[in-house]
Image (cartoon, rainbow, N blue to C red):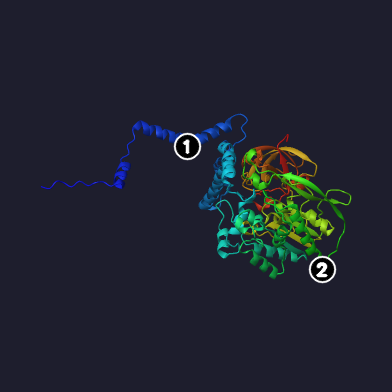
Amino acid sequence: MKPARIHQLSREELAKEQIGRTEISRPVAVVLSALFVAAILAWPAVQIAQEFQPGATVEVLRHPPVWDSLRRMPAHWARLEGRGWLGRLLVVNADVLRGIQETENELDASSWLTVAAQPGYQAVLYRWLGVGNEQAYAGREGWLFFRPEIDYLTGPGFLDERQLKRRAAEGSEWRAPPQPDPLRAIRAFHRELGERGIDLIVLPVPAKPGIHPGYFHEAYSGAEEPLQNPSFRDWVRRLEDEGIRVIDPGPALVAAARAEGRPQFLATDTHWRPEAMDRVARMLAVEIESLPAWPGRQKDYRRETLPITNPGDTAQMLSLPPAVRPPPETVEILRVLTDRRELWRPAADSPVLLLGDSFSNIYSLPAMGWGDSAGLAEQISYYLGMPVDRLVRNDDGAWATRHMLARELALGRDRLAGKRVVIWQFAARELAIGDWRDIPLEIGQPPQRSFLALESGRRLVLTGRVASASAVPVPGSVPYRDHVVSWHLVDIEGLPEGQADLAQAVVYLRSMADNVLQPAAFVRAGQAVVLDVSAWADVADEMDAINRSELDDWELQMQEPLWGEWPGE
């Protein structure tokens, strides 16, 4: 009999056998499992301890939005009677999903772990690896870039049919999808203005990396033309073929950068420098003065230079510790004064109306930190020699200022009366990411008084319940350090005699200041509040231009708002 043949295991077979037979004693398994569970529970335990200690500044887990959504489910279900079982279920489910998303956003923004660990982690990435974060990209020579602008330049054409369909499906159970086609919105706006004999000038401000691509990547250092989204030139051509005036500042800004040897945009901010804005204001003035029967200069303005030093908004989005932050930049703004040396003011009776976003605000809105009375409207006034009217707000240039104009008209205030030209300025990136929603311009009647409104100069302290609140952005997720939230306040008490039936109001409050969430950001639907309220008109000149989120209900958006503060502020 032959001896049995012994199979020699290969190294791979031996390794697989050993892996498959790994033995762990019961005490070791218990300890490892306990450590794993402790690691999972450690963060929420520390978070809860932080929130419930005296003087806590974060209240994400104490009052999570998702809990408020669950708590109001029975009342919400009862109000939807008549929609059917499935319809009610879908609406209530959407409200809970919104609460989950808001809870996650607040944890991202203000949790103990984020506040404690993010600055150090970001400092290592920025200082040693030369990278930014998901919103602010680090370029060359200390330059920083806002990610949506890079996406605008490198992404698909915004007029591509597949891209339009994809964006039109971007909604969720609690958020309506955007209207992605800028051509449709601009054509409608042009038509409505044309019916009143008003010319429209469209001003898309180019993306910073499109004018200075060499600061993002050295391969583009010699670019002689601005970079744009693949659909941009086709978009301009199609508008001009329909008689719509488009002023594209890109070529002029690139030529100026090459000729003068200096940037046209701020290195650590998303916005243009004062010299670039001044150049565009001159281009607009030349275009406006070429209109038939233009009345010409009406008054003289003067300008004074004023140095301003400020950290850029993109730099602040990095959330770096002070020792690692990029240095602030200094510019000389061109402040516009009247011939009596008074600060420039908009004029509602001007034949020129500017609708603009933060590129119009940057040197005009003090909250942005770059000075005042030196924005785009002011420079247009200076070159035209006449007052200019304006409706401006940071962010959402695709719809926000059209919405402001539509509300003025719907409330019976004809902001277009006597206008000859409307300038619609927006950031070019809005063409790819903006919501170009349909907003009809219809003159209405002042609404019947069912909502509380106050005369200018009057203040009240009242108690009410928040029925709904608009969304608040995560600090650092947008290039604006301030935000205003909208509330629908009901069950109001403390009203003066004769106004007891006006037990609801729309209230605006500051929800973020200098990238720090304010108490109003943490208030949820159903909570009772005590507010010191005043007329919105008393603060509109300063606060109307700040980034603001509106309530979803169009009828609420049409109400005259109040301005709210916590008593004692």
| Along the viewing direction, whichever of 66 and 87 lies nearer the viewer | 66
| Along the viewing direction, whichever of 446 and 12 lies nearer the viewer | 12
Residue 371 placement, left or right of 121? right
Check disc 1 and give the amino acid type: Ile
Check disc 2 and give the amino acid type: Pro
| Along the viewing direction, whichever of 278 and 293 lies nearer the viewer | 278
Q: Position of residue 538 (x, y in %)?
A: 78, 44
Q: Position of residue 376 (x, y in %)?
A: 76, 54
Q: Which of marks 1 and 2 precedes in the sequence?
A: 1
Secondary structure of the residue carrying tag 2 is loop
Q: Is residue 556 visible?
A: yes
Q: Is residue 496 visible?
A: no
Q: Position of residue 481 (x, y in %)?
A: 67, 44
Residue of label 1:
40
Spatial separation of the CA atoms under disc 2 and disc 1: 71 Å
Q: Is residue 170 above or below residue 311?
A: below
Residue of label 2:
292
| Along the viewing direction, whichever of 476 and 308 lies nearer the viewer | 308
